[in-house]
């Protein structure tokens, strides 16, 4: 099972495997009725939608091929454990295809009930598995979780404009199951976990050519939600990096220069928002180049580009003391085969410490 590069903050969740797990039916195996159509998450015990949308329940025993496991209307995906999983529309584009229009602000939230309220000051270990559906047209960042005392039933089908307790600044494009892990220190009394997209942190990437099998959706399968209490002596910080870093996928520069191109501003702006929301997090900004040019030129160029990103973030209000630049020239390539590989011309953000 591949771990994804995810930023997590305060985050509880649920599964059915262990008595210590406070997740109600986190693997979606306990259902009151076999799903007969999309939109029936209510048939999974402890699960609901947090707004006026139709979160899907998928099952090997479904009575409708649209919501079967493994083959269903959004792709082919086996369950990581058991026979069932859920699925949400994280983003719905506004393209008009034929006579059907998209819904730019439509998004779905999976709401999970906890088996008991959380204890103030207690740290909880959290994990869940997600995978981008194969028939998605988009992938997004901004997937996250918020913990609440009250059950949500918002009377619209758009974004919940509340501050998440966990959020990802990484665009998730992996169609295999990926594990997200983190820790949450409870405020006390939380009884629900809500998973979905938080618009203030969302960066959208279209991953298919125009008009090719266009579902207009960024759609994610979800399974194995788990929340377990950790020993107080093992308390984790409220923000954790799984695997330590993430790449800025849309960060581009003028050729052989450290001038950031305008199409990169959206992703950098989202990163700035994230870092300002977590002012105690210090990160490295690591610059790399491809293998063209001499070592001296590449080292200088990677330094200039890392510092350009740092300057951009500082100008957006990020504390400069929390941004440490490093540069590696053409060392540590991702693509070993191509000399001028665009994959190797990159900047990565790596967690350093949490103060």
Image (cartoon, rainbow, N blue to C red):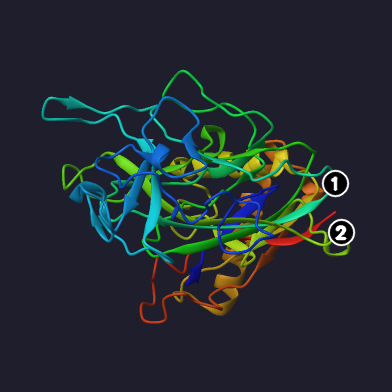
Classify mark 1: helix, strand or loop. Answer: loop
- Mark 1 burial class by Cα count in 10 Å: few <14, some 14-19, many 20+: few
235 left or right of 25 in image: right
Does label 2 or label 1 sit earlier along the sequence? 1
Q: Which residue is at the front of the view, 238 or 17?
A: 17
Q: Which residue is at the front of the view, 270 or 102?
A: 102
Which image quarter: residue 295?
A: bottom right
28 left or right of 287 in image: left
Which image quarter: residue 240?
A: bottom right
The residue depicted at 46 percent of the width and 40 percent of the height is 262
Q: Residue furthest right?
A: 233
Q: Is residue 323 visible?
A: no
State the quadrant of the C terminus.
bottom right
Residue 255 drawn at (x, y percent): 43, 57
The residue depicted at 16 percent of the width and 42 percent of the height is 211
Which image quarter: residue 167?
A: top right
Classify mark 2: helix, strand or loop. Answer: helix
Q: Which residue is at the front of the view, 187 or 150?
A: 150
Residue 27 drawn at (x, y percent): 48, 56
Q: Are marks 2 and 1 in contact (CB under 8 Å)?
A: yes
Location of mark 2 (residue):
232
In this rendering, the answer to whether 327 lies above or below 317 is below
Residue 102 drawn at (x, y percent): 26, 28
- Mark 2 burial class by Cα count in 10 Å: few <14, some 14-19, many 20+: few
293 left or right of 114 in image: left
In this rendering, the answer to whether 336 lies above or below 110 is below
Q: Is residue 103 visible?
A: yes
Residue at mark 2 to residue at mark 1: CA–CA distance: 9 Å
108 left or right of 296 in image: left
Location of mark 1 (residue):
121
The residue depicted at 34 percent of the width and 34 percent of the height is 92
Residue 148 drawn at (x, y percent): 66, 34
């Amino acid at each position: 099972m591949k771990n994804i590069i995810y930023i997590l903050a305060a985050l509880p969740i649920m599964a059915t495997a262990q008595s210590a797990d406070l997740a109600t039916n986190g693997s979606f195996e306990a259902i009151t009725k076999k799903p007969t159509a999309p939109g029936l998450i209510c048939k999974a015990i402890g699960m609901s939608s947090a707004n006026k949308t139709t979160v899907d329940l998928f099952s090997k025993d479904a009575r409708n091929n649209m919501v079967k496991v493994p083959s269903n209307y959004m792709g082919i995906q086996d369950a990581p454990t058991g026979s069932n999983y859920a699925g949400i529309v994280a983003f719905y584009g506004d393209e008009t295809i034929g006579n059907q229009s998209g819904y730019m602000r439509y998004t779905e939230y999976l709401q999970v009930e906890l088996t008991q309220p959380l204890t103030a000051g207690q740290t909880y270990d959290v994990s869940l598995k997600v995978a981008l559906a194969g028939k998605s047209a988009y992938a997004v960042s901004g997937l996250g979780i918020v913990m609440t005392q009250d059950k949500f039933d918002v009377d619209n089908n758009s974004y919940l404009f509340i501050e998440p307790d966990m959020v990802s600044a990484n665009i998730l494009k992996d169609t295999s199951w990926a594990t997200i892990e983190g820790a949450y220190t409870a405020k006390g009394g939380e009884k629900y976990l809500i998973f979905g997209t938080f618009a203030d942190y969302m960066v959208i990437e279209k991953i298919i050519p125009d008009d090719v099998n266009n579902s207009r959706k960024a759609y994610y399968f979800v399974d194995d939600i788990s929340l377990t209490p950790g020993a107080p002596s093992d308390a984790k910080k409220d923000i954790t990096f799984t695997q330590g870093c993430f790449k800025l996928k849309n960060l581009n520069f003028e050729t052989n220069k450290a001038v950031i191109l305008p199409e990169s501003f959206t992703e950098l702006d989202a990163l700035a928002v994230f870092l300002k929301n977590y002012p105690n997090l210090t990160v490295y900004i690591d610059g790399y180049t491809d293998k063209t040019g001499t070592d001296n030129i590449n080292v200088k160029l990677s330094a200039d580009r890392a510092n350009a990103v740092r300057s951009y973030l500082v100008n957006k209000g990020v504390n400069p003391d929390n941004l440490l630049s490093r540069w590696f020239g053409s060392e540590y390539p991702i693509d070993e085969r191509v000399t001028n590989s665009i994959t190797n011309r990159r900047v990565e953000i790596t967690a350093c410490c949490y103060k």
